[in-house]
Image: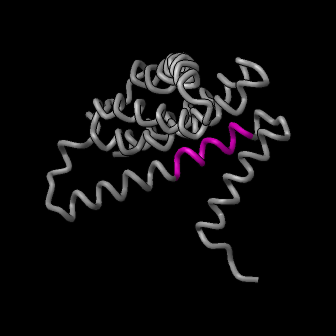
Amino acid sequence: MAPATPTKRWHALLLALVTARRAGSLTLHCLLAWPAALLPSAAFIGVAYGLGLALGIDMAFFEAPEREGTFKEFFGMVVFAPLVETLLLAGLLALLSRMSRRPVFVAAASSVLWGCLHGSFGLLWLVGTFWSFYIFSCSYLAWRAQAWWKAYVAAALPHAVLNLTAFLLLLLD
């Protein structure tokens, strides 16, 4: 049997994410949503950074501001931001859902808005947050029919773990 290609592995992860929702496993969904948000976002940042370097652009302008790794930064990035942003995400998705009944469009519009907002921290964050907020939006929309709190957890928990990963990576820099 031939080894799975990266595309096949990616499709398997997305299928598992959808299957976890259908099976009703919020825990499994959250565990799968984190890499589904993280890996493509990291790839988009890498491609954008590489293109910028190849074009001779000074990438220091596009990078996120320096982090000191303080408890205040940790709390803000890993706890406060995901909790508050998910509340705002819920409201935005409710508003966008009134304009369109197509969840893919609603999630895509939400991700564009969130990407632009995060771009104020550094333009590479704009590129990196489009996909992750698409996953958070899809997660919220998929679980909203069961219960608001499940939708909230389905979006907020992978967001917090993604931000924890980013925080730890920023400390290594």
Residue at 40%, 18% (x, y): give it. 72
Q: From what the image shows, is residue 62 above or below residue 156? A: below
Protein image colouring? one colour
Q: Nearer the viewer, residue 25 or 99?
A: 99
Residue ranking furthest to the bottom: 1
The percent position of residue 58, horizontal first and vertical second, equals 14, 51
Q: Please give the range of residues in magenta.
A: 29-39
**53 displayed left or right of 139:** left
Residue visible at 83% across and 35% down?
24
Magenta-span inclusion, residue 133: no
* Residue found at the very far right of the displayed protein: 23
**x and y percent of residue 48 in the render?**
31, 55
Question: Residue 112, can we see it?
Answer: yes
**17 horizontally vs 66: left or right:** right
Assess whether residue 38 is covered by the magenta stretch. Answer: yes
| Quadrant in which residue 47 is drawn | bottom left
- Residue 77 in the image, given as x and y percentages of width and height: 44, 26
**Residue 140: x, y in percent?**
64, 29
Give whichever of 105, 164 is nearer the camera. Answer: 105
Total numbered labels: 0
Seen at 53% across and 39% down, the residue is 134
At x 75% / y 25%, what residue is drawn?
A: 145
Q: Would you say 160 lies left or right of 45 here?
A: right
- As rendered, which of 98 and 148 lies closer to the eye? 98
- Magenta region's main secondary structure? helix
**Whether residue 79 can be seen here:** no
The N terminus: image quadrant:
bottom right
